[in-house]
Amino acid sequence: MELRQLSRSLGELNVIGWEGEETDRIVKSAGRVLNILELFDVLQREAPVSEVSGLLGLPQSSTSVLLRSMVVMGYLCFNPQTRAFSPTTRVALLGNWINGPMISDGLLMGLMHRINRRTNQAVIIATRNRQWSEYIHVVQATDAVRLFIVKGSRRPLIRSGTGLMLLADLPDPDIKRIAVRTNAEASAGEPQCCIPTLMEQVAAVRGQGWASSFDTITKGGGMIATRLPHLQDAEEQLVIGIPGMTVDLRENFDQYLAILREETDHYLAERRSDSIDRIALLQ
């Protein structure tokens, strides 16, 4: 995703948080279709072919073919007056059956919006994708001066606050393998991870139950993160975090961490109550 052009499209000064996919492992057409859907989720409005192709760095001709194919399949609609495309309700309903008690019933969204209202900061949900921490949902900050976090962004597990929180749930040998792989695949000039230091950081995160990082990936930006509690072993491990300007996060660290803890405890109580109500209905 072209961040400078996205910044202009959104009218945002500080758009951060994108890492390109490993294109050699992705079927090109499939990756492009999903990128288009993710782009609309970021824009949250209709967009013409030229804007979609420009933001994704794709040829306009092939982008046009993909968009029109998605119209035929019912996932996009075309506005002939504006000559722009937008997602249909069919897209919104695709995954509403997944983790129903956690997501589609509104508890997780309610948690994110409560933290957002109390801090005015962005709130993200992250999960592990191989050696990456991937932001799967974002509620943007409400302050006038803010970091705009792109949904779908990825950060290395070994160098990010959400990544350290996700690593804390893995066995030590797995963490070391991830660190070795990340070091081996690092671009020229990218800092190498000191594995003993990483293991010390993970041990600290396990003990305290939260993780933070400042200026490690985005200069002037940071993250405070904690584990999102779950009730069923089959549920995907998720992390909830507050990204923001380093200065603001450091000044309000204790307050933001307390809010994260209070609201995740409240969320867990809501989920337990919801589970009890569901069981009662079935009896």
Image: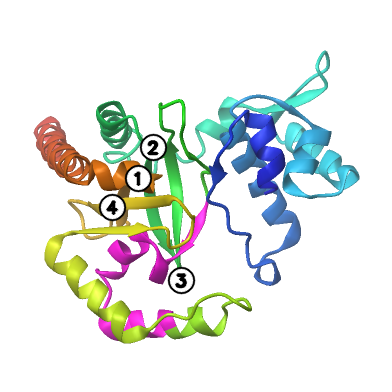
Residue 130 coordinates in the image, percent (x, y) = 46, 70
Return the mark for residue 20.
Answer: none
Q: Is mark 3 on a helix, strand or loop?
A: loop
Labels 3, 2: front one: 2
Labels 3 and 2 touching (C-beta < 8 A)? no
Residue to which mark 3 is pinned = 131
Main secondary structure found in the magenta portion: helix
Proximity of marks 3 and 1: CB atoms separated by less than 8 Å: no
Give how far across and how far down residue 50 sits, in percent.
83, 35
Identify which amino acid the numbered label 4 is placed on. Answer: Ala
Q: In this view, does 80 lie above or below 54?
A: above
Along the viewing direction, whichever of 183 and 30 lies nearer the viewer: 183
- Residue at point 15% right, 44% down? 261
Residue at the disc numbered 4: 225
Instruction: Give residue 247's mark.
Output: 1
Q: In which quarter of the image is residue 25?
A: bottom right
Whether residue 228 is visible: yes
Which of 278/142 is in front? Answer: 142
Which residue carries the number 2 mark? Answer: 122
* Residue 99 showing in the rendered view: no
* Image side of residue 189 versus residue 269, left or right: right
For mark 1, give the secondary structure.
Answer: helix
Q: Which residue appears at 34% of the width and 82% of the height?
A: 174
**Three-letter amino acid code at the position of disc 3:** Gln
The Cα–Cα distance between marks 3 and 1, rounded to whole angstroms, is 28 Å
Type of residue at label 2?
Answer: Ala
Q: Few, some or many C-alpha atoms within 10 Å of disc 2 (few <14, some 14-19, many ≥20)?
A: many
